[in-house]
Every structure is written in structure tokens, then in C-alpha cells.
């Protein structure tokens, strides 16, 4: 329980992260946490986890803390020029959406928040 994992270090004056760890920038994390907050208030999610690794940064959202994540939002910069660096992965591990832009990848989750308003 004494292991402490440091956040990515800022390098130089340009503010680029070191090559050893992938992370979310401020706007990306703000967009993800905004969606998380709306899903919590709607009663869909109760917990989250963030994993910052060498190949990917992963945000996992849980219905309950003891289950598998309902959705994982992955950022893999190595796939930027191929399939897109963002991926939305479902509970079973299937890739639900891939893309270059975060907002497009989050669209299927945001649709869960839409409600039909009757007259």
C-alpha cells in the first residue's frame, strides 16, 4: 500500500509530457469528467478509475465498484494515424467506437442521457 505512482512529469518550457507515460490533457479530462458527473447524477455510474501507462491512458467507469467497468475510454496516441487514438470499449471488451475526436467517441454514452420529452 506504500506504492505511489507519479503523474506524468511536465518537460521543458513547451509543457510536453515525457515519453514514458501517456496522460489526458486538461480539456480531455474535463470533457470526460463532465460526462461522468452527468452519468452519476442520472444514476448510471457510481465509481471510476484512471490508468496512465506507457501505451495508453484509460478512464474506466463503473456501475458498482466491485464489477467490471461498464465503459472504458482509451487514448492510444500510437494509433493516431491509423484508426484514431480514441476508443470506447464496452463491458465485454468489444470496441464500440473509434475515432480521432473525443466527442465523437463519447456520443454513444451521451445518447444514454437523452430522454424523450412528451407533450
Image (cartoon, rainbow, N blue to C red):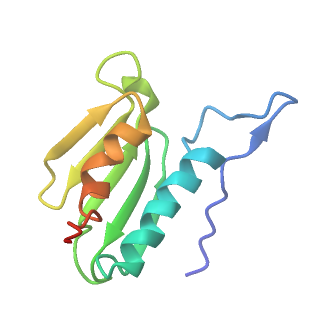
Which quadrant of the structure image shows residue 42? bottom left
The number of callouts visible is 0
In the rendered structure, the answer to whether residue 3 lies left or right of residue 91 reads: right
In the rendered structure, the answer to whether residue 17 lies left or right of residue 104 reads: right
Quadrant placement of the N terminus: bottom right
The residue depicted at 29 percent of the width and 65 percent of the height is: 113
The residue depicted at 19 percent of the width and 71 percent of the height is: 118
* Residue 31 place in picture, x, y as percent: 52, 52
Residue 69 vertical position relative to residue 41 in the rendered view, above or below:
above
Which quadrant of the structure image shows residue 79? top left
Q: Nearer the viewer, residue 26 or 31?
A: 31
Residue 28 vertical position relative to residue 35 in the rendered view, above or below:
above
Note whether residue 24 is visible: no
The residue depicted at 27 percent of the width and 67 percent of the height is: 69
Q: Which of 25 and 21 is in front in this view?
A: 25
Q: Which of 38 and 80 is in front in this view?
A: 38
* Residue 88 place in picture, x, y as percent: 28, 47
Note whether residue 32 is visible: yes
Quadrant placement of the C terminus: bottom left
Amino acid at each position: 500500500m506504500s506504492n505511489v505512482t507519479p503523474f506524468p512529469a511536465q518537460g521543458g518550457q513547451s509543457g510536453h509530457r515525457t515519453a514514458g507515460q501517456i496522460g489526458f490533457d486538461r480539456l480531455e479530462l474535463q470533457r470526460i469528467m463532465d460526462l461522468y458527473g452527468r452519468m452519476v447524477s442520472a444514476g448510471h455510474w457510481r465509481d471510476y478509475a484512471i490508468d496512465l501507462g506507457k501505451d495508453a491512458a484509460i478512464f474506466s467507469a463503473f456501475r458498482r465498484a466491485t464489477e467490471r467497468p461498464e465503459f472504458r475510454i482509451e487514448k492510444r496516441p500510437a494509433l493516431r494515424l491509423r484508426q484514431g487514438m480514441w476508443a470506447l470499449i464496452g463491458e465485454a471488451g468489444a470496441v464500440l467506437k473509434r475515432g480521432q475526436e473525443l466527442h465523437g467517441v463519447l456520443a454513444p454514452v451521451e445518447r444514454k442521457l437523452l430522454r424523450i420529452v412528451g407533450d
